[in-house]
Amino acid sequence: MRTQTEEIRGRIVEAAYESFWRQGFRRSSVDSIAERAGLTKRTVYAYFRSKDDLLAVVMQRYEELAAERLEHIGKRLPADRVGLVDSLFVQLSGWASTTPRWSGSGFTRLVERSRIAPRRRRNHGSPSGWQARALRTRTSARERSCC
């Protein structure tokens, strides 16, 4: 019985997260969360006293997941500064390109669409303006760190 209770609670938390992420906290209703979870509104209220309590649990859960993700990413990062910057841009570009519905922040969209990302630079024409300056800056930083 305990496993089923945890499974139902997890479904509610997942549904609430998705609803809050897509519609925002104010626009999300307990009805829509229950529908996403495939449960009744009454069941949601049996597990959580209010939408505010549900938000607190959602935030706590996703704080834990974010910490795990950051730890995983940190283990894969190179130790040198230039490698770190290159790795960051490659990972951001890869993540943004595999998440098509995510519009992202302006900075992340810039990384995805620019020719700065090392993997994408090879297939495009020569950069102009700010892109060329960014490439020169990155190149000169790489030269300073290697010698």
Image (tube, helix red, strand yellow):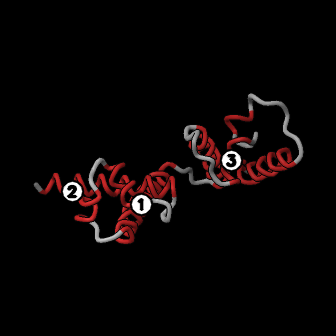
Tag 2–tag 3 contact (CB < 8 Å): no
User: In which quadrant of the rendered view does residue 6 lie?
Assistant: bottom left
From the image, tell me which residue sits under label 2.
Answer: 6
Nearest to N terminus: mark 1 or mark 3: 1
Tag 1–tag 3 contact (CB < 8 Å): no
Give the residue type at disc 2: Glu
Say few, some or many: other residues with alpha carbon within 10 Å of mark 3 (under 14 / 14 to 19 / 20 or more): some
Give the residue type at disc 3: Arg
Q: Residue drawn 80% across and 45% down?
A: 135
From the image, tell me which residue sits under label 1.
Answer: 29
Q: In the image, which is nearer the foreground, mark 2 or mark 3?
A: 2
Give residue 144's position: percent from left, percent from top: 76, 53
Give the residue type at disc 1: Ser
Describe residue 36's horizontal placement relative to residue 129 as left or right.
left
Secondary element at tag 2: helix
Q: Residue drawn 51% across and 60% down?
A: 24
Secondary element at tag 3: helix
Describe residue 126's horizontal placement relative to residue 33 as left or right.
right
Secondary element at tag 1: loop
